[in-house]
Every structure is written in C-alpha cells, then in structure tokens.
Image (cartoon, helix red, strand yellow):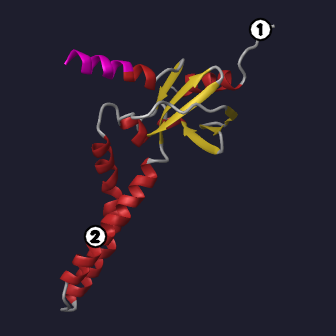
Amino acid sequence: MVDAVDRANSRKDVLVNADFVAKSVRHPGSRSRSYVFSTGLMKPLAACMLPVMIGALIAMLEGLPVLQYLYVGFPLALGIAAIWTSIDSGRKLAEIHLRPDAIAVRTVMESAEPREPLSWFRLLDVRVLNSEIKITVGYDIFVLEREKWPDFELLKSELVKSLYPSQDL
C-alpha cells in the first residue's frame, strides 16, 4: 500500500514541474474523466435531441409511427453529442504551466486525470487586450478570457515575464 502511494506521489512530481501554474474556472479538480465527459455531454445532447423530439411530436400529432424517430434519432443524437463533447472539452484550456523559458497547457480532459508528463513549448507571442489575452504556443493560438481565469492579472504578468525573461549580462 505504501509503495502505491509513493509511486503516485512521484508520478505527480513528474507530471507537474512548473514555476507558475494557473487554473481556469473550468478546471475539473479531482473529478474523473468520465465525470467531466458526462457533465459536458448534457448541453450538446439536449441540443441534438431537440430535433428528434420535435420530429417525434409531429409524427405523433399526425398519427404516424413515433418509434422510428426515436430508434434512429436517439443513437444518432448521442453519437453527434459525444463527438461534439470530446472536441469541445479537448479545446478548452484548464491549466497553464509556466517556466522562464517554456509553457505547457492542459485541456479540461487532460487535467481531469493527468496521465502524461507535460509537453513544454516555447511561448511565441502574448497579446494583451482589455478583457482577454491571446497567446501563441507552437502552432496554436489560445484566447484567455478574464472571467474564465481567477488570477488573470497575475497570469498576464507571468506570461509577459515568460515571453521576455530577464537576461543578466
């Protein structure tokens, strides 16, 4: 039992080795990936089921068979909603890890149960606007909105410091 705890603690040390870590309000905390996926599935499933339910209602009002809409429509809506959720939760940032020379980001799904070490990239650009920050990490551009990041001002200053590290001569 002690060995399992030691391995888990050492794994956490390997997974997080940053000077500064910022967490979004979307951060799942200690929740599992299945919990994060299922809670993220609710709105897309509701949006995808709406046409199925309207089609079933119209069929019912016209006296047509209803089950064909449900037998075909529900699995189709569930599949589309699952794809929508996996793409959406794979794009939303939940964590930003900063070092003086590099940045690593994790999406909502990646931060639910970190399985891999952080992938460090060079921060290429930081654009500070009124209520958002646009950062360029590798080939990706991320927009960080003020209301989604509780420590927005601190994050902004750390991003600028990471982009332009002080060099002692």
Span colored in magenta: 1-10
Tell me the residue that label 1 is attached to: 168
Measuring from the top left, give residue 74's x and y in whole percent. Answer: 26, 71
Secondary structure category for the residue under label 2: helix
Which of 157 and 72 lies nearest the eye of the viewer? 72
Compared to 10, does 38 lie above or below?
Answer: below
Tell me the residue that label 2 is attached to: 75
Compared to 53, does 60 lie above or below?
Answer: below
Q: How many marks?
A: 2
Q: Quadrant of residue 137?
A: top right
Looking at marks 1 and 2 on the same chain, the residue that comes earlier in the sequence is marked by 2
Residue type at numbered disc 2 = Pro
Measuring from the top left, give residue 117's x and y in whole percent. Answer: 47, 30
Q: Quadrant of residue 99?
A: top right
129 is within the stretch colored magenta: no
Q: Residue furthest front?
A: 3
Which of 60 and 109 lies nearest the eye of the viewer? 109
Residue at 29%, 81% in the rendered image: 55
Residue at 61%, 22% in the rendered image: 158
Residue type at numbered disc 1 = Asp
